[in-house]
Amino acid sequence: MSRRVVRQSKFRHVFGQAAKADQSYEDIRVSKVTWDSSFCAVNPKFLAIIVEAGGGGAFIVLPLAKTGRVDKNYPLVTGHTAPVLDIDWCPHNDNVIASASDDTTVMVWQVPDYTPVRNITEPIITLEGHSKRVGILSWHPTARNVLLSAGGDNVIIIWNVGTGEVLLSLDDMHPDVIHSVCWNSNGSLLATTCKDKTLRIIDPRKGQVVANNFEEPVALQEMDTSNGVLLPFYDPDSSIVYLCGKGDSSIRYFEITDEPPFVHYLNTFSSKEPQRGMGFMPKRGLDVSKCEIARFYKLHERKCEPIIMTVPRKSDLFQDDLYPDTPGPEPALEADEWLSGQDAEPVLISLRDGYVPPKHRELRVTKRNILDVRPPSGPRRSQSASDAPLSQHTLETLLDEIKALREQVQAQEQRITALENMLCELVDGTD
């Protein structure tokens, strides 16, 4: 008589549970836009949710600890002139978030540690380059200030947020609408899906598709997706992929292994209400003392509910096997190093003593001075009246005005910095 062998895995009993009612975020008017993004982004400091807003697009940013009922007048992040379609936190600065909109722009925002008293309306920088709506955003996993955007113009643009420049534009790779884009772990390759039903692996710096002939699937799982799209979230530390159906009420999760059959169904977390979107906490934001291996932020029509995945353990000690060193907030490369061809794996941190997010770090944008760019060589056009040289007096007047304006801006920056420091001290004093 043969006995069935049960596959050994420490993740066979991953247990999902919704947080208690007082740990949810209530009275949030979640966006009703029909778009396939997750509508939610979370990091160890903040929860961001795309919301309904009159006269343009907006999202709300809440400190993680601010659970319960959200005041209807709570400040929003506003600035887009059409609905916001996607948001993504910078992996290297927990106070920086990017937003993409139907208005064809991408905006990058600095969120203060204190609660602002009014709407945040001024982005650090606005990135303009797409000709149609921008619906996909993804920060580079290891290079500082590198952000990817994809739009309805079937173009992928990779930006240097620190200068506002376009690093790369991939405009002839996709014949139809791009559905999703994902970096690999060191940011050397992209995986994209497209309306033409083709999965592409792209080397963005070479501008080449390096693989898209996937005739034989490694594994096949039939799923009921009649209610909407699947939002996949992959945790490389545990090799678990979570599939959240947008429009249904379940989270299915599978373990990925190197040996056949490669994909192993673990379990399904089900609840009564369907999800409008889903946020996925980075590993450094989890509670290691409770053996928490994943945390989702499930969007309902008017609230956000945390869902916690744990591996039951009897010991209170740190579980090394559940928590290998994981990507931290420090970038491994600068933007120009990555563009020149360098690759680097993420800078890892240990979670043994838990993770404390660093204090507010400001992102400074240094736009290139167009006067530093030499004029193109070639025949000079004939001089017209508008090209007449400026008089010495006019030049001196202009320089004096520029100097006065620069001094005024510097004084205002010092005043703003002083006010921000006072606010931070007040917040720290009340904690």
Image (cartoon, helix red, strand yellow):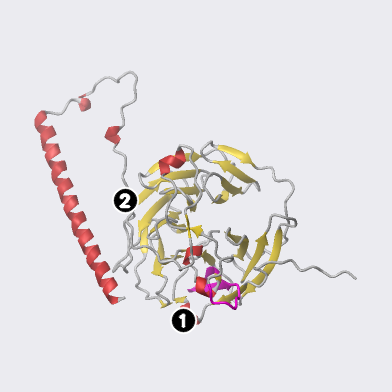
Q: Residue at x 43, y 46 (%)?
A: 333
Seen in the picture, residue 238 relative to 369 is either above or below; the reply is below
Which amino acid type is shown beneath numbered disc 2? Arg
Q: Horizontal and vertical percent for residue 9? A: 68, 66
Quarter that holds the C terminus: bottom left
Q: Is residue 130 visible?
A: no
Seen in the picture, residue 296 relative to 334 is either above or below; the reply is below
Element at label 2: loop
The numbered disc on residue 223 is none
The segment highlighted magenta reads: 293-317
Q: Residue at x 14, y 43 (%)?
A: 403
The main secondary structure of the magenta stretch is strand
Q: Residue at x 48, y 65 (%)?
A: 351
Magenta-span inclusion, residue 412: no
Q: Horizontal and vertical percent for residue 93? A: 39, 57
Examine the image and state in which quarter residue 369 appears: top left
Seen in the picture, residue 303 relative to 387 is either above or below; the reply is below
The numbered disc on residue 364 is 2
- State the CA–CA distance, disc 2 to disc 1: 37 Å
Element at label 1: helix
Q: Is residue 412 left or right of residue 292?
A: left
For the view shown, which residue lies furthest in the right direction? 1
Which amino acid type is shown beneath numbered disc 1? Asp
Instruction: Write down the residue under mark 1.
Output: 22
Quarter that holds the N terminus: bottom right
Seen in the picture, residue 115 relative to 36 is either above or below; the reply is below
